[in-house]
Image (tube, rainbow, N blue to C red):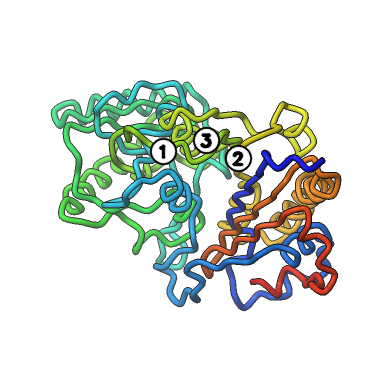
Amino acid sequence: MINFGMHIQLLLPDLFWPEHSAADVYGGLELAALERLLAKGRLRAEGRQRIETAAETPASAEDWLGQRFGLEQDAGWPIAACSLLADGGEPGAHQWLRADPVHLRLEGGRLMLADSGVFAISQQEAGSIADSLNAHFAGDGLVFYPLRPERWYLRLVQAPALQTTPLAQAAGRNIDALLPRGADAPLWHARLNEIQMLLHGHAVNELRESTGAPAINSVWLWGGGSLPRGLPAAFNAVWSRDPYAAGLAQAARVASRPLPDDASALLDAGADSGVHLVLLDQLRAAARYGDAQGWREGLQQLERDWFAPLLQALKQERIGMLSLHALGPAGTLSSEVAHGDLRRFWRRAKPLAHYA
């Protein structure tokens, strides 16, 4: 008997390679399960328009999640407050910004950003830098909280008039067009300059550079806002490694679960009814840093660990419906597949590049 009560939704950032002209990156990929799910499902495209300039960005997981949880995007999504909640902090009614440690490097006249996905930072290093920042900005009422070595939070006196860029969209890119914008941008640009000057000669960075590690020479400000209240329960459970997704789930009183290693573990963990959102962001870092080989390997791993087992579960009627939401450079492509859709023999599988 089909388990009509179980609907798994996969959110897949960077399922499509971000460079339109690099079609050969798809060559030789063996993705039979994914390609079948896309072919048999009911497809829906949202905002699929070509991106022409570097300042524009692909559809993001942050946008998708904010919309599904009923948030209204004014200056941006309250990512800092939500991820703070997931990291065990108490956002209260305060205004927050993420102030994540980054390394800026000048390349050919462009200032390129690297995040902690490509360098290590210890909790001791994070705490030492945060102590220096808190001492410097004490008169401005700014307080830095390094709850995780790679995720820092900044508590504000009041909400700034800023539009910011998510760190995942800035990583590996020239930051000139991605810095905070809005009425308060000049003030915050000046503060970023102060932070960079303070960190330039910091003892933590002197030690890091002596060992060949990248200096933590700036922070990336993004995701401002306060913790949202009264969110709709868009799903029965959210399975993710992402603190924003986890925090949104907690704020909406939805079950927040750590991402299992594979689909079999998910099904064995008691996911047997309701709508389950599964955020698979394993391709994100490779896509952002232009690591085509890493992206291909990550895609093959998703095929083995997630797409193939879920297709099999759909065939065996362990689940009633599977939805894929693929985020890429042209927007969002969604495919909704029920058990009966697998019998549509006239819908032949096409290579992933066909949908890109």
Where residue 232 is drawn, which disc sits there? 1
| Cα distance between the residues tagged 2 and 3 | 51 Å
Q: Residue furthest front?
A: 1
User: Sequence order check: which comes first, mark 2 or mark 3?
Assistant: 3
User: Sequence order check: which comes first, mark 3 or mark 1?
Assistant: 3
Instruction: Between residue 40 and residue 98, name the one nearer to us.
Output: 40
Q: Are marks 3 and 1 in contact (CB under 8 Å)?
A: no
Q: Residues within 10 Å of mark 1 (few under 14, many from 20)?
A: some
Residue at image x 25%, y 57%? 181
Instruction: Between residue 15 and residue 193, name the one nearer to us.
Output: 15
- In this rendering, the answer to whether 288 lies above or below 95 is below
The N terminus lies in which quarter of the figure?
top right
Residue at image x 47%, y 60%? 173
| Cα distance between the residues tagged 2 and 1 | 14 Å
Element assignment for label 3: helix
Going by the image, does 175 lie left or right of 183?
Answer: right
Q: Position of residue 239 (x, y in %)?
A: 61, 35
Per the image, the residue denoted by label 3 is: 210
Q: Position of residue 21 (x, y in %)?
A: 62, 78
User: Sequence order check: which comes first, mark 2 or mark 1?
Assistant: 1
Q: Amino acid at mark 3?
A: Ser
Residue at image x 76%, y 60%? 341
Q: Amino acid at mark 1?
A: Pro
